[in-house]
Amino acid sequence: VNFTSDNTYGVAPEILAAINAANTGTVPSYGRDSGTHRLKELFSRLFERDVAVFPVISGTAANALSLATFAPPHGAIFCHAESHSMVDECGAPEFYTHGAKLIEVGGANAKLDPILLETAIARLRKGDSHSVQPAVVTITQATERGAVYTVQEVQTISRLAKGHGMALHMDGARFANALAHLKCTPADLTWRAGVDVLSFGATKNGALGAEAVVFFDPECVKDFEYRRMKGGHLLSKMRFVSVQLETYISNGLWLRQAERANALTAKLVAGLSAAGVEITNQPQTNAVFVRLPDETVARLRKGGAQFYDWEDSKDGKTVIRLVTSFATPDEDVSRFLSLVKE
Amino acid sequence: VNFTSDNTYGVAPEILAAINAANTGTVPSYGRDSGTHRLKELFSRLFERDVAVFPVISGTAANALSLATFAPPHGAIFCHAESHSMVDECGAPEFYTHGAKLIEVGGANAKLDPILLETAIARLRKGDSHSVQPAVVTITQATERGAVYTVQEVQTISRLAKGHGMALHMDGARFANALAHLKCTPADLTWRAGVDVLSFGATKNGALGAEAVVFFDPECVKDFEYRRMKGGHLLSKMRFVSVQLETYISNGLWLRQAERANALTAKLVAGLSAAGVEITNQPQTNAVFVRLPDETVARLRKGGAQFYDWEDSKDGKTVIRLVTSFATPDEDVSRFLSLVKE
Amino acid sequence: VNFTSDNTYGVAPEILAAINAANTGTVPSYGRDSGTHRLKELFSRLFERDVAVFPVISGTAANALSLATFAPPHGAIFCHAESHSMVDECGAPEFYTHGAKLIEVGGANAKLDPILLETAIARLRKGDSHSVQPAVVTITQATERGAVYTVQEVQTISRLAKGHGMALHMDGARFANALAHLKCTPADLTWRAGVDVLSFGATKNGALGAEAVVFFDPECVKDFEYRRMKGGHLLSKMRFVSVQLETYISNGLWLRQAERANALTAKLVAGLSAAGVEITNQPQTNAVFVRLPDETVARLRKGGAQFYDWEDSKDGKTVIRLVTSFATPDEDVSRFLSLVKE
Amino acid sequence: VNFTSDNTYGVAPEILAAINAANTGTVPSYGRDSGTHRLKELFSRLFERDVAVFPVISGTAANALSLATFAPPHGAIFCHAESHSMVDECGAPEFYTHGAKLIEVGGANAKLDPILLETAIARLRKGDSHSVQPAVVTITQATERGAVYTVQEVQTISRLAKGHGMALHMDGARFANALAHLKCTPADLTWRAGVDVLSFGATKNGALGAEAVVFFDPECVKDFEYRRMKGGHLLSKMRFVSVQLETYISNGLWLRQAERANALTAKLVAGLSAAGVEITNQPQTNAVFVRLPDETVARLRKGGAQFYDWEDSKDGKTVIRLVTSFATPDEDVSRFLSLVKE
């Protein structure tokens, strides 16, 4: 029973099969292969408009490169205090932007609160060279707390960002999970709602290592290819990354997998609620956070369950995080629920 | 007939099989899996001493991260004028070192000339804050011109570097090809000859995407892990990178593949020489550079041969580069030679 | 009546005289002159221990260079949410540290609250490469709100910083004003209380343009001189900066000037309090913040008073900042108080 | 007799008087004073067109900030192998550009050779993200070897730069000396010849510490003010820098001083030539390089002359550099010549 992260699981069989099938003959290196070129058409169709798409192999690279395209060194990037960019990337955005400032903003369920965002923006003095200048707002969809921004919520933040001349970035490491929850189109959740650039994640949901940076206005790409190269993220045998992305979005694989991961968490949530366990997040996708007595936490671990403590123990209780993936066995949920109820 | 680059070929069957076999169950992410841990032991055995080893997925990342570990922002990095770090990485070393200066040095066959190196070092004023300070010498083994530094040559450069308080980095994107040519031990060609850090390449010689940064003195690792993370190069499903490296160095696979690639070039060289073609490099590994009349070049292309022009046409002749790989078909060599002789 | 900033005043006559006197003959450039060398002795005597001292010409440079000496690119710098480094330097610390993360911490009167600091530090995961690592705590003495840390308060923060392996930096742009208030020795307020590096300000208190970076342990200087040069802060005619610093700390000039500035603010505070004006800060040095009805604010401006609005108008009232300097005329205080009472 | 550098001399009396006169009353800080604003008009008149002008306090800052305005992190900056930016700024351009690559080009008398420049540019692969991209050409006027580019030579380089989409920067640390030699207008030597941005030096020629970055097309200024602030180069008491620049260019002071410095060198050259001394540069401004027997060099030093050895002793002879300034006493030249002839 491993609920530590969706990262602990391997590769979807369809994607691995595609990698194997791609291992034939010679193709141009460094992304000049036909498979990589095809991504533009495939992603444009998926998003119902002409997009620019660049494969990379880590979510941190996708985020940092996206942000650096829109934020100058004297720019401010507004992000949630719990966002991956803020707390889990060791300052990669600061590195790739050459020293932009990340400004943390609060909000329940790791979702940016528009009021707090507005306040944070207002603190900067526009046009005053002593102050960093508003450049980008970044939101995570689904959030690090398993919650989802509705299309309207994305629009609200986008209007706010645009009103201050800022771009909107979406960290979609778990974009599929959000989409599976909302059941809207990829276009509605992104550019139609004002998103300028998306870190389109595939790794957590079944790829071996593949993310795509999607620019909804190809004009905005600017120096992206040079930045990617300077960061060491242009791969020689790119065909093997691109084929993962192609397979991932073909025939609805990505959404089926996200639906399965979400459904497992929903089952977990139902069982935990029935057992009277305190749920501390809004578990809309594939993660649920629960507060449990420390003895229970210990007993679960003893029983073979793996997961992360998310906060330090307080008053004898600890908040833990449970994440399900496209490949989590069904029986893991029931086994975990049995352990809880013991 | 594709002689453009060893990068155009895919993955060795053994390595792909290992990736497939690794796709089972859950393992800790971000390099905390047992396969990644095992690399330390395997590489220590390979190099006959206790090393620190870090998998990354591009040669540019391996080089830039290696150099940044030894060169401060005010450091000077001496490299060959034709080296990958100097001309093919879009300034990745400058980015990762936060602005160190790469100083180009000449030498035949893309090998650093020790005399020219000494002269270049002497131009810097040590201890004067107006001048960048000697920090690292980097050499490519085998070089971008297919040549190989002998163990003695590496020692000479190492002594020179050490005499000025500098570290020695080896860009081993084609380390296996060099070793296959020299038939010495990996230890003799690296730390015993004074190399401090090695970009150990596997991608060009049969991996899907896997390089290793090898520090011969684990004390020197310093901030490496933070730099790698900041660069977006710590992969979540690291097991699939590590297993490539493990398979690559197991049972002599890497050397067998390099020997094959070298042998194909040797055959090509023999045939071209016999045909009276002018060879412009010292083809010790898997690349040969030849000067051919422009009509011949055009005829070869028409005949289906693929390769890069390496220099602009001059006096009706062009220098082209021919690279063979572990997977180049034997018949490609003979077909190419027939085309030449037509 | 100009209370906008101590920066709006010029140069103390003694300091200007010294600049004039220094304009004779030839001296070595770039800080190799005897006047610059003498600073080491003078500052060592002032601080009662062997220090290393480097003149620069802006407070931002002093702060950013100090922080960069202790914070690696993957470091975290804890500072007050209202500190100059956080909000008034356009990200200079991020630039000079090559992308370290500034983490804001709250506290009344722009003083770091140790409890909030402890909490902020605890959020970082030590040794985990996904997280930036604790590197420096920076405090402003006196603060941007005119308050002063007591020696004990500095000690508390220092212990906290040291307990997490961090250095302590003091932004002393108004160090003299703090010292004049506390009446302790420079040594007691700095290294004896655990400060590792001080931005010793002189410009706001009477210099033309001169700040000193003071390292209390010369071992910690490390790459400072190279960083200063790379930043373009090594001046050719350094003698004219050094002589300002020498004159400033000689014969108690600096403290006399700070005492005068503080005394003027104290008089202002007394008058404002008597007039029933709401004072919003703890005016221990040369700045007082008051909340006044917008009509009063307008009337003061109409009457010729200059000052900054510090917060946006709210409920018909605005917080304004009043700063006095070493050179503010006595009558400006009485004229301002008369204007208030009109 | 001090011929080490024009930096060793102090401040012109007119400029120091102006600094003293500026020390009155309160003025807005950080360059919002009327004196700083006036520079725009004064420099626009001087250059016969609408320019943007920014005072800074070091030549290194002026150069690095100028280059960073035109060169992205993936840009290439072409400069002479002996240029200040290449060898005397500890990598400041690399720092301010966030890792652009400086590419050295040869040429006699430290002047860029257009043919070599063309060759160097041709080596970069335009549009290929593996390669840094042509961004800026920088030339020093007068050069580090005391030579001057004619207006036509500047035009030739400009055409070359523009033909490759590059900007042209002029490091004018000794711009006045070049102008005094050529006797053309400032406009002819800069924008009319294709210069986009000029580091206009005043410090070496009589200021205390003042340089100006002059953009000939105000559209090109872009992020300059933010970069300057991030670098810590926006001074609070800017009036004292601006007044130096104003006085410097008023009433022809700058040109008179440069003429005097040049004339002293001319006298030195005449005397040395008459004495049969080998002159190794083209001494068009205020520096002459001569090759002398080591015994002569020793004797000169013993006799009280100060200067730098410019190259290591070879075959019993050493090349030394002699620099005259606006303030070098006339008798120093005759005393030096007497020493030579002894």
Image (tube, coloured by chain):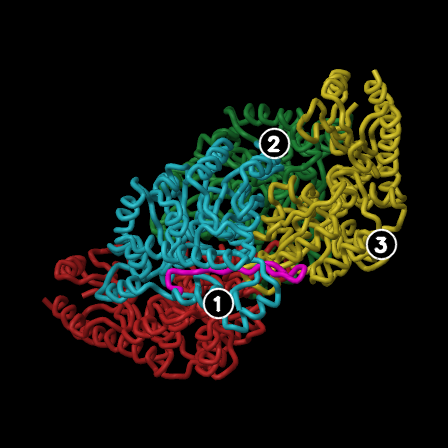
Chain colours: A yellow, B green, C cyan, D red
Q: In which chain is the residue bearing label 2?
A: B
Give the residue number, with chain letter if any, for mark 3: A187
The number of numbered badges drawn on the structure is 3
Q: Residues within 10 Å of mark 3 (few under 14, many from 20)?
A: some
Q: In this view of the protein, can residue C278 be seen by the observer?
A: yes
Q: Is residue C20 above or below residue B175?
A: below
Q: Are marks 3 and 2 on the same chain?
A: no
Of residue B334 and residue B261, the one placed in the foreground of this image is B261
Name the quadrant of the C terminus of chain B.
bottom right
As rendered, which of A158 and B214 lies closer to the eye? A158
At which x and y percent is residue D87? 39, 57
- For residue B199, side relative to residue A16 (left or right): left
Circles 2 and 1, Cβ within 8 Å, touching? The answer is no
The image shows residue B188 at horizontal and vertical percentages of 47, 30
Give a yes or no on whether discs 2 and 1 share a subunit: no
Which range of residues does the magenta coloring cover?
A: C311-328
Note whether C58 is above or below B283 in the view shown.
below
- Mark in the foreground, 2 or 1: 1
**Kind of residue at badge 3:** Ala
What is the C-alpha distance between the residues marked 1 and 3?
Answer: 64 Å
Residue type at mark 2: give it: Leu
Which residue is label 2 attached to?
B255
Q: Secondary structure at mark 3?
A: helix
